[in-house]
Amino acid sequence: MQTPYYEYDIALLNSILSTAKEEAQRYSYKIHYALKANSNHILLKEIARQGFGADCVSANEIRVALENGFPANSIVFAGVGKSDSELEYAISKDIECINCESVQELEVINQIASSLGKVPKVALRVNPNVDAKTHRLITTGLKENKFGISLKEAEWVFANKNNFNHINFVGLHFHIGSQILNLEVFKQLAIVVNRIQKSLGTINMPYLNLGGGLGIDYENPLKNPVPNFDGFFRTVNEHLIPGENQTIHFELGRSLVGQCGKLYTSVLYVKETFSKRFAIVDAGMNALIRPALYGASHKIENISGGKSDELFSYDVVGPICETSDCFAEDATLPKTSRGDILVIHSCGAYAESMASDYNLRERPRSVYVGIEVLA
Ligand code: LLP
């Protein structure tokens, strides 16, 4: 098959979805799938079919979620910069909740809702100032981040609710970051949420959304394909004090789809320079930007058999005219030659969805295995 391409294991996706669902159901938690992680339609149909809600961050994501089987009343809409037309679209579709990120946005929602004769459900995204202890660029819940509104402003909003007579305030939303493996962080979040709910009096409201962020094992994807949903939900359950009639929502992206996707790429050239040995492959940062953007590390395997037991060190780089177009520095691989196929693991999340045609490269196609479960 022509490389590069993404391969999705639908059977693995299904088993990850089932585990997540089972663990969440233990506590009557509701999961919305964060479409930004991957909006591939085959995956979306499967996730919708399994009964997950959707977490969207643009009108296009809402439209695609609706087209692929997510009911409007299971769709939540977040984002710091929702345009007027996006809000108009979301409100007109009667989605489950708009997660509002500023007082100005609240005013715009109120105005648009009034002109449409609607009263949308809105949750305030509060910035909890909890350190997710993950990469700086995927941390969202610190006070210096652009996300959410401060506790002070939230207090003002709830004290002045009557100014917003076209808004149905249903509760609070939080999201502190992504690729979080340290569960202690979610304990901290739960504790802070308890405090915030107490001071805002939102405990009597029906909606509490703790966002997403559960990480996956990029180092050992084959050994640990299923993320620690059990520990994640258990930690929240142990520390969160919800209101009696509150439904707890989550927005999981990476943990649901990250391990079901791989990127296949061919070695075009092996080039030895003064100090380095490069395996130059036909996939570039346009197909997987995570290493370039966050210094992320994905397991790489040579599946063409490895011609000897001897291991060598390679920088695995793409064809794009940027030094950051590098998937791994000093990766240890068996002797690698032109024509070998390399597999880059854990590409189900934030690979295809962040792909571009930079350098006018084609985006990789997608193929599917384990698809018979769809029948
Ligand atoms: N909810 C909100 C409001 C979010 O901003 C995000 C992710 C999620 C849920 C889903 O988070 P997850 O469960 O996937 O961690 N491109 C980066 C990740 C960016 C995450 C952005 N927000 C990466 O490749 O690591």
Image: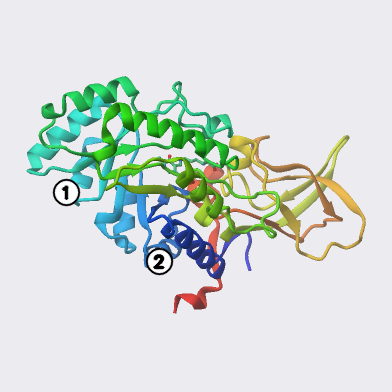
- Within 10 angstroms of label 2, few (less than 14), some, or many (20 or more) residues? few
The quadrant the C terminus occupies is bottom left
Relative to 262, 100 lies left or right? left
Q: Which mark is residue 25?
A: none
Instruction: Give the residue type that dot 2 points to.
Output: Gln
**Residue 109 lies in quadrant:** top left
Which sits in the foreground, 164 or 330? 164
What residue type is disc 1 on?
Ser
According to the picture, the residue beneath numbered tag 1 turns out to be 92
For the N terminus, the image quarter is bottom right
Tell me the distance, in whole angstroms, between the alpha carbons under discs 2 and 1: 26 Å
**Residue at mark 2:** 50
Q: Nearer the viewer, residue 289 or 245?
A: 245
Q: Note whether 96 is above or below 304 in the view shown.
A: above
How packed is label 1: few (under 14 Cα within 10 Å), some, or many (20 or more)?
some
Q: In the drawing, does residue 130 fall left or right of residue 108?
A: right
Which quadrant of the view contains residue 144? top left
Q: Is label 1's Cβ within 8 Å of ligand 1? A: no
Q: How far across and how far down the image is residue 276, in percent?
A: 84, 39
Query: Where residue 168 appears, x then y in whole percent?
Result: 17, 40
